[in-house]
Image (cartoon, rainbow, N blue to C red):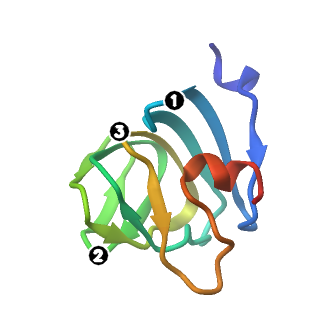
C-alpha cells in the first residue's frame, strides 16, 4: 500500500484523520493518524499497550516532543494528550486493545475505531 492510496477517514476532531491498516475483532488495530499543524488529539487512556512511530512531523505530550523517526511505547492504563507540531504529524500507531477518550468535550468513542466512524 502506498501512502497516496490510503483510505483516510474523517473524525469528529477537526484536523485529525485516520486510516486503518488493520482493525481486528480482538480490539487490536494498526492505524495511520494524520494531524494538522497545532491540532490536538483528545486526551485518552490506553486500554492496552500502544506503540507509535512518528513518520513525519512531530507531536508533543507529557513525555516531551517526539520527532520524525522516533518511537514511543505507551503502557496499558496510561493516558496522554498529543498535540501536533508546527508541521503537523503523521503517526503509525499499533494498539492491542484500543483507547478510551477522556475529555468531556470530546465525542464519546469506545475506541479509535469509533472515532473514525465519527460516532
Q: Are marks 3 and 2 in contact (CB under 8 Å)?
A: no
Q: Residue furthest bottom?
A: 104
Total marks shown come to 3
**x 55%, y 67%: residue:** 41
* Residue bearing mark 1: 25
Answer with the quarter of the image where residue 71 lies. top left
* Residue at x-position 51% and y-position 29%: 25
Label drawn at residue 96: 3
Q: Nearer the viewer, mark 3 or mark 2?
A: 3
Q: Nearer the viewer, residue 17 or 23?
A: 23
**Which residue, given by chain and number where applicable, does mark 2 sit on?**
62
User: Helix, strand, or loop for circle 2?
Assistant: loop
Q: Residue furthest top?
A: 1
What is the x, y in percent for residue 2? Answer: 65, 16
Q: How far apart are labels 2 and 1 at the CA level?
A: 31 Å
Q: Earlier in the sequence, mark 2 or mark 1?
A: 1
Amino acid at each position: 500500500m502506498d501512502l497516496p492510496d490510503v483510505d483516510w477517514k474523517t473524525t469528529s476532531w477537526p484536523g485529525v484523520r485516520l486510516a486503518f491498516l488493520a482493525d481486528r475483532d480482538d480490539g487490536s488495530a494498526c492505524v495511520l493518524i494524520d494531524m494538522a499543524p497545532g491540532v490536538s488529539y483528545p486526551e485518552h487512556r490506553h486500554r492496552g499497550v500502544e506503540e507509535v512511530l512518528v513518520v513525519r512531523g512531530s507531536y508533543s505530550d507529557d513525555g516531551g516532543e517526539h520527532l520524525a523517526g522516533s518511537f514511543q511505547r505507551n503502557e496499558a492504563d496510561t493516558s496522554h494528550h498529543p498535540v501536533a507540531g508546527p508541521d503537523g504529524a503523521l503517526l503509525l500507531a499499533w494498539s492491542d486493545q484500543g483507547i478510551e477518550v477522556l475529555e468531556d468535550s470530546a465525542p464519546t468513542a469506545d475506541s479509535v475505531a469509533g472515532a473514525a466512524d465519527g460516532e
